[in-house]
Image: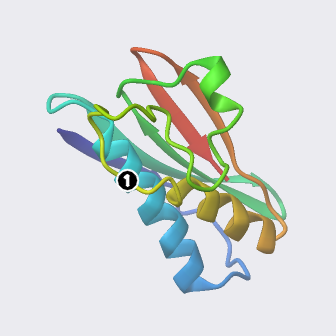
Amino acid sequence: MQISNSITDQIQAIKADKRRLKQMIVNLLSNAVKFTPQFGSVGLEILPENDHAIRFTVWDTGIGISGEQLENLFKPFVQVDSSLSRKFEGTGLGLALVRQLAEIHNGSVGVESTPGKGSNFYF
């Protein structure tokens, strides 16, 4: 798996809980790695969105998520594949926590995804 990052040096200091910010990034990166095949790619991009905000984006070339699955993705205990034979482990709390922490920081979280091509999660 290829892992890359793109972090501009033009980012100014932000006021945020460093521990929670790290937790958000780790949760998104963990999901990206979990749902990306061995020869896929995962990345982190941190860029200024405007004069007062920074956009953190975690992207992958993984399995992707369908439009109908996106609706419930950030709800606690929800798994994209909730069948008994599901391939991927997890509690379904990681993305719900990311959303909650983003909102605590007066932000939001979003996702763009295409099944079979990958996902971009951003906050």
Which of the 4 image quarters holds residue 56?
bottom right
Residue 97 seen? yes
Residue 29: image x %, image y %? 39, 53
Residue 8 can be seen, yes or no: no
Quadrant of res 12: bottom right
Residue 101 spot, x, y in % from top left = 68, 70
Left or right? Give the position of 111 relative to 6.
right
* Vertical comparison of 60 with 101: above or below: above
Against 109, residue 87 (above or below) is above
SS state under label 1: loop
Residue 116, above or below 101? above
Which residue is depicted at the point 66% across and 20% down? 68
Q: Residue placed at 62% from the left, 47% from the top?
A: 122
- Measured from the top left, where is residue 34 in percent x and y? 29, 44
Residue in the picture at 33% in, 40% down:
42
| Residue at 78% from the left image edge and 74% from the top image edge | 104
**Where is residue 64 drawn, in percent x and y?**
45, 24
Amino acid at dot 1: Gly
Taking depth in this image into account, of 114 and 4 the one nearest to the observer is 114
Quarter of image, res 78: top right
- Circle 1 residues within 10 Å: few <14, some 14–19, many ≥20: few
Give the side of residue 33 with respect to residue 107, left or right.
Answer: left
Instruction: Classify the position of the N terminus by image quarter.
Output: top left
Visual colour scheme = rainbow
Q: Which residue is mark 1?
A: 90
Question: Quick one: 12 or 37, which is closer to the camera?
Answer: 37
